[in-house]
Amino acid sequence: MKKGITSLVLIGLSLVLGACSLNAGVASLYKEETPLHAAIQIPASFKDNAEDVISIELEQNGERVESMESPDFLHAEIWKQDGSLSFPMEEVEQDEDGAFYVKKEFDEDGLYFIKLHASSNGSIITPKKQFIVGELSDEELEILQEGAQEEEVDHKHHH
């Protein structure tokens, strides 16, 4: 009797597991994503009383994104680590050669962050990069050495 029950259980289990096998063409049913990549280029030094340019290179599918029509949106926000200064999120500009950039005048020394909000062909990315303007205070230097745990200011923006 035990052999009969064991045989029935094994047959039933085989049927259930056999029904769950993958279909050969199942991968084609899912969307293949082409990830968007961004490289944020920070200037080596910042000028006093002048706008500095932060360059942004976008790449998707191994090719450079050169048109503002290609990314669905491309915005940047910049803030100082201690929260004392925050530039609002704004659309990134593009020059005649197709390069993307943000121009800002940094009047205060310190530890800053830039965060991009970019989307193209269904791929959304929000890379963030820290950078230093001028000299750091002792507190900022300590924070940087501890891994730069930035104090987030209100970053609730809508697209």
Image (cartoon, rainbow, N blue to C red):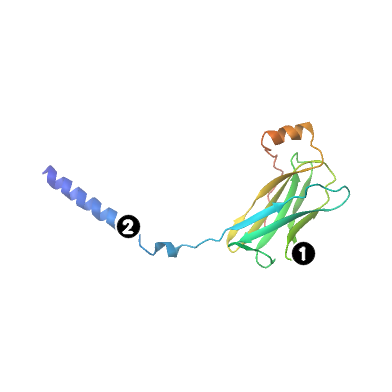
- In the figure, 109 relative to 100: above or below? above
- With 159 as the anchor, is 140 left or right in this view? right
- Circle count: 2
Mark 2 or 1: the one toward you: 1
Label 2 close to label 1 by CB (< 8 Å): no
In the rendering, which numbered label is found on residue 21?
A: 2
- In the figure, 6 relative to 119: above or below? above
| Residue 72 in picture, x, y percent from top left | 65, 64
| Residue 24 in picture, x, y percent from top left | 36, 63
Say which of 92 and 44 sits in front: 44
Q: Amino acid at mark 2?
A: Ser
Q: Amino acid at mark 1?
A: Asp
Figure quadrant of the C terminus: bottom right
* Disc 2: CA contacts within 10 A as few (<14), some (14-19) or many (>=20): few
Mark 1 or mark 2, which is nearer the start of the sequence? 2
Say which of 71 and 48 sits in front: 48
| Residue 51 in picture, x, y percent from top left | 84, 53
Q: Residue at the spot x=85%, y=48% of the render? A: 47
User: CA gap, disc 2 to disc 1?
Assistant: 53 Å
Q: Residue at the spot x=72%, y=32% of the render? A: 142
Figure quadrant of the N terminus: top left
> Which residue in the structure is indicated by mark 1?
95
